[in-house]
Amino acid sequence: MAAPTILVADDDGAIRTVLNQALGRAGYVVRTTGNAATLWRWVRDGIGDLVITDVIMPDENGLDLVPRIRKIRPELRVVVMSAQNTLLTAVKATERGAFEYLPKPFDLNELVAIVRRALQTGETAGGTGPQEKAAELPMIGRSPAMQEIYRTIARLTGTDLTVLIAGESGTGKELVARALHDYGKRRGGAFVAINMAAIPRELIESELFGHEKGAFTGADTRNPGRFEQADGGTLFLDEIGDMPSQAQTRLLRVLQDGEYTTVGGRAPKRADVRIIAATHRDLGQLIRQGLFREDLYFRLNVVPLRLPPLRERSEDIPELAAHFLAAAASEGLPVKMIDGAAMERLKIHRWPGNVRELENLVRRLAALYSEETIGVEVIEAELADTPPAEEAEPDGNGLAQSMERHLRAYFSAHDGGFPASGLYERVLREVERPLLALTLQATRGNQIKAADLLGLNRNTLRKKLREHNIPAVRVNK
């Protein structure tokens, strides 16, 4: 049997060479081109078993090719790769029928695994999706962690699957829920949000399911609940871990039977809604404590989605800060910039309040400081009284336990379908960077003292600082 032929289109010659070598070693026949016209001619002539195309090419946008390819050769799967690593790119690729979206830079092992999976399955992703939206970014960040979030959202746009979003406060759980709605099948319906922690427990059932007139003291009129308001759309149940047990039982029935009754009502109503739930709490621990129903958890946890805290994606901080500065300027606040040393200081902060804390800080910088360019001294002063993100355990195992939680979440999220190899090196780098940066800060930029404290040779320390792009900044007294 002849080896499958892979068609590669990318205007970057180096990428074409790398893909040609990697796919050739994997046993495939590879044809490469730097333009969309040649790729289209090959596809039209019936050549190729799989297409890998870049988005930006000199003669045509690769995304525009995808529906044309599907129209004449619906069995031919297309993998889209792009350096424009945003949620909109991922969603557009999926909407137009791409089998997979791969952000650049990518891992070659991951790409080969995607090719193998695409050739083994007869299914194609995508279908008809929503019309293109304006080029506004509902979420910001190009880190690997955010790329995984974008890709997951893109895969879910054509489904009504229930999603359970886990993440610390301030990580953007409602933004993800809104993106799932805005780019999903129910975008024409309402997006209704309810925060369980913000409503008195005795009123939650009435708020969710509505009540009839006279159902209880003070019920002078009929009240439609959030399920009724979200009919045909999406219901976002924020802080689901704070839902009282009786309401959990009623919600479980909705998820099982698709029906509910209002408080004081008798006739069941159909629940035509998509459920997205979110929590910052450990639901597993709540289940063990008898505070959350295990059967409800499994009904909600159809698609688990973990949002990383900001400290785990510090490379996104410059883009986030620039976005918030621009937003502040558009609202009439003075135009500001943050210099390099100050930005590095922001990147090593623990951010217990996550993206929300960063946004508040940036707005405060724009409003209160006269300097056009914000320096590291201002940042130091602003962050001086910030509480720590988490206290170390008394036995000194706080770091180990934190890493264990992170890795457990990582393995659980991927469930065996891991995106790339090299986890050991990535974990070491994630730990090493803040260790070096904070030690340098603690020694006020004195590399001799920092090297001695770390037990490293000074030249080794300098090399590692360069590798991690950590500036040798002396903090002023």
Image (spheres, rainbow, N blue to C red):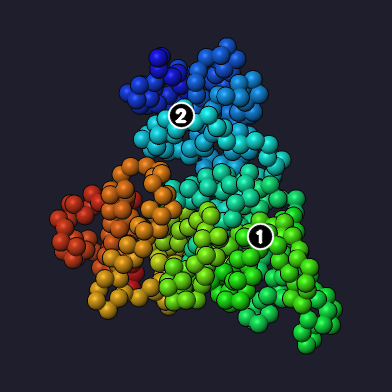
**In-front residue for pair 219/340:** 219
Disc 1 to disc 2, how far (Cα)? 36 Å
Image quadrant where one finds the C terminus: bottom left
282, above or below 89, in the image: below
Q: Position of residue 255 (x, y in %)?
A: 62, 61
Image quadrant where one finds the N terminus: top left
Q: Residues within 10 Å of mark 2 (few under 14, many from 20)?
A: few
Residue 476: quarter of image: bottom left
Q: Which residue is mark 2?
A: 120
Indicate left or right for 34 with 250 as reference: left
Q: Position of residue 176 (x, y in %)?
A: 58, 56
Residue 398: give its label: none
- For numbered disc 2, what is the local secondary structure? helix
Q: Amino acid at mark 1?
A: Asp
Residue 338 seen in render: no
Indicate left or right for 420 with 369 as reference: left
Residue 294 seen in render: yes
**In-front residue for pair 304/321:** 304
> For the point 55% across and 60% down, which residue is it?
299
Q: Which residue is mark 1?
A: 257
Q: Amino acid at mark 2?
A: Gln
> For the point 63% across and 38% down, which residue is it?
95
**In-front residue for pair 399/418:** 418
Indicate left or right for 355 with 326 as reference: left
- For numbered disc 1, what is the local secondary structure? helix
> For the point 60% across and 71% down, which residue is it?
249
Q: Residues within 10 Å of mark 1 (few under 14, many from 20)?
A: few
Outermost residue toward the bottom in this view: 217
**In-front residue for pair 223/66:** 223
- Check if mark 1's residue and mark 2's residue have beta carbons within 8 Å: no
Q: Position of residue 175 (x, y in %)?
A: 60, 58
